[in-house]
Every structure is written in structure tokens, then in C-alpha cells.
Amino acid sequence: MIGIYIAIIIGLLVIIVTLFLNISPQFGKGATKEQKNEYAKSGHYEKGKFINQSKTVIDASYWNMIKEMIKGSPNRRPHQNIVVEKIDSITIENHNTNITQLTWFGHSAFLLQIDGKMILLDPMFGKTPAPHPLIGPKRYSKELPIEIEKLPFIDAIIFSHDHYDHLDYGSIQELKDKVGQYYVPLGVGNHLIEWGISKEKIHELNWWEEIQFEGINLTCTPARHFSGRGLFDRATTLWCSWVIKGKNDNIYFGGDSGYDTHFKEIGDKYGPFDISLMECGQYDEEWKVIHMMPEEMVQASIDLKSKLVLPIHWAAFTMAYHDWTDPIERITKKANEMDLPVTTPKIGEPVIIGNETFPTEKWWKNYISENKN
């Protein structure tokens, strides 16, 4: 009888998972045959999958990951809620259009105000970067700098790839009635269309393709990473970084990437950059080919010819085994050795591009557990 009960439970779980995978809108939509034929012309699409410029094999041991999960650490997330700096819609709308300003929402999400336009970068505003809130890590902060419904009209959204911590279904649903245009790498547009975004608003780009948006030049540039939202769609959409060049300011948005030669290629072709938004967290030696180690991030920023660096992909979720403050501590130390300026704003604190002064407070130290050695 026990065996029958176990079999019934397993069968029910299989049915539930299968239904969830097929019914939940979170997973988006895949490419058509015609689209796949077009992707094959991109120069980095083989056997139905996009590939990196360099051979990229993740040599991760599941046994090591299990050991790390079991071992745990009291410092893998803050010991209390991170308090964010609040902003309001009036302040945003009254922004001086001659000033380029970035406001960080934690992880990789930003509001960029440039040349009178409002642009969101990877606006993952949800509480959990997962297809269901019960299976993902919780956000460190209880609030956002501004609630989605209070945001003014957004001229454009730029996405780097389709992972849950960058492309969030719930955020898209709350934002879609107040967004003008969407700029995404190849294949990601299918998800947006499935979620109710008009095809006319979506612009899909391949690596090295450029497009003009209201006088701002956007270039989709390479990254060394992967994509996927379901169990069987790995690398079926493209991943990228972005060059955003306005009238006076040149910005690099790195998305997610392992270290590789593309940083120097981009720096030589489009640099120098007034500021680079660079991934620094959720790394591990076993998967550093797709997520840079902190010291590699510093070198990548130098390759890009960055005048100023803003570390991202941290301070929101625990998605790796390192202590949550290790990335920023290691980066600021290495950057100081390499004479690379780094800005460390609080979540919600604006960074004005071109200012001689910028946020450098080590605010994260207020949230370190007393048990940390």
C-alpha cells in the first residue's frame, strides 16, 4: 500500500509540474521555424541554439553545489531588510533634461534618464527571480525606490536576456500600459508578444547591430552567457550587452557575462565609456565562464575604457554561495589597486553622469551580520 501511495504522489507531482510548464505564462514562447532559419544567419546559431564567441563549457559539480547548499552561511543575505532611498514621480518628471542620471533598483535594474528620455534597463521589480514565488530567493528589500504604478511614462525598456532575474513577467504586466518601445536581443521578442506587447513596439537586434531611438544610439553587443526560462529552451534566445550613446554621454550596460575578449572589442569600437554598469555578483569558480569573478570585472572595465564603474547584479537576491557583500568588497579593493573609479550608490540613490563627485559610501556594512568574521 505504501508503494501505491508513493506512486500516486509522484504521479500527481508529475501532472502538476507538466501542467505548470504548459499553462503558466511565465515561460514565454519559443521561436517559429521561420525565425530559427533567420537566427541561423546571425553568425552564432548552431543546431537550434545560440552560442558564445568563445567555446563556453560550464564545468560545475552537482556534488559541490549540494555540499555548498548544505553548508550554508549566515551571511549569504543581509541580516535585516535593506532600506532603499525613495523617489517620486514628480521628481522624475521634473528632471533636468541636460543631465544624464541613473537610479539603481537593485540587482541589474535601472532607470536611465538621458536626453529627456526615460529608459528602464532589465526592470526586474518582482520579489522572486523565478517562475513561481515559492521556488526562488526573496528580495533583500521590502520596497522599491518607487512603486511601478507611480512611475511616469517610460519611453523605452532595454533587456539584456531572458533569465528570470532580468526579464520578469509580473513587472512586464504592470509596466506595459506605460511603455513606448522595447529593445531586446534576438528571440526575446516572442516572450513579450506572448505577454500582450504589440509587435510594433518591439525591436530585436543581433550582436553588433545598431538602432536609433529618439536621437539616442543603441548598439546590441556581445556577452558571454546563455539564456532560457524553461527546462528545455536553454540558449534558444540571444543574450547581450548594450552600448547606449546619447548626445553627450556614453554608457555601457553589461547584462550578465563571463570574462572574454568581447570587452576589449567593445571598448576599442565604442569606448571610452563615461560609466559602465558591470555584473559583479552571483559568481563561482565553477561557472565563471558565464559570470565574471570580481577581479575579472575590474579588468573587463579597464578593457572597456570605463571612466567610472557601477557594480550591479548584487544587493537584491542570493543566487550563489558567496556572502552577499563579498562581490562589492572584492571589487572595490581590486579597483583601488588598479586606480579604477567605482561608484557604490544605495538602492534608489541617483548617480549623475559627468559629475566630479559620485556616491562612494560603503552602505552595505550597516547590514553585515555581527557573526561575520
Image: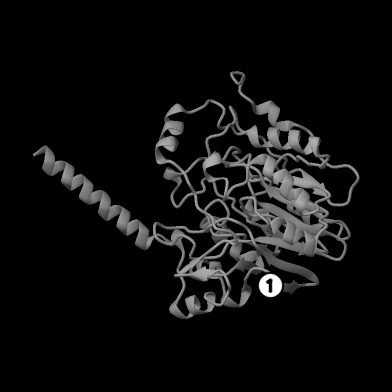
Residue 191 x, y percent position in the rendering = 51, 66
User: Residue 371 appears at what percent x and percent y?
Assistant: 59, 18
Amino acid marked by disc 1: Glu
Q: Secondary structure at mark 1?
A: loop
Q: Position of residue 4 (x, y in %)?
A: 11, 44
One can see residue 214 in this view: yes
Viewer-proximal residue among 14 and 89: 14
Task: Tell me which colouring the rendered structure shows.
Answer: one colour
Quarter of the image with the C terminus is top right
Which residue is rendered at x = 63% and y = 56% of the image? 122
Mark 1 sits on what residue? 209
Q: Is residue 131 above or below residue 346?
A: below
- Locate the N terminus and report the quarter of the image it occupies: top left
Q: Quadrant of residue 157?
A: bottom right
Badge 1 density bin: few <14, some 14–19, many ≥20, Cα 10 Å: few
Does 220 appear above or below 362? below
Looking at the image, which residue is at 83% across and 39% down?
339
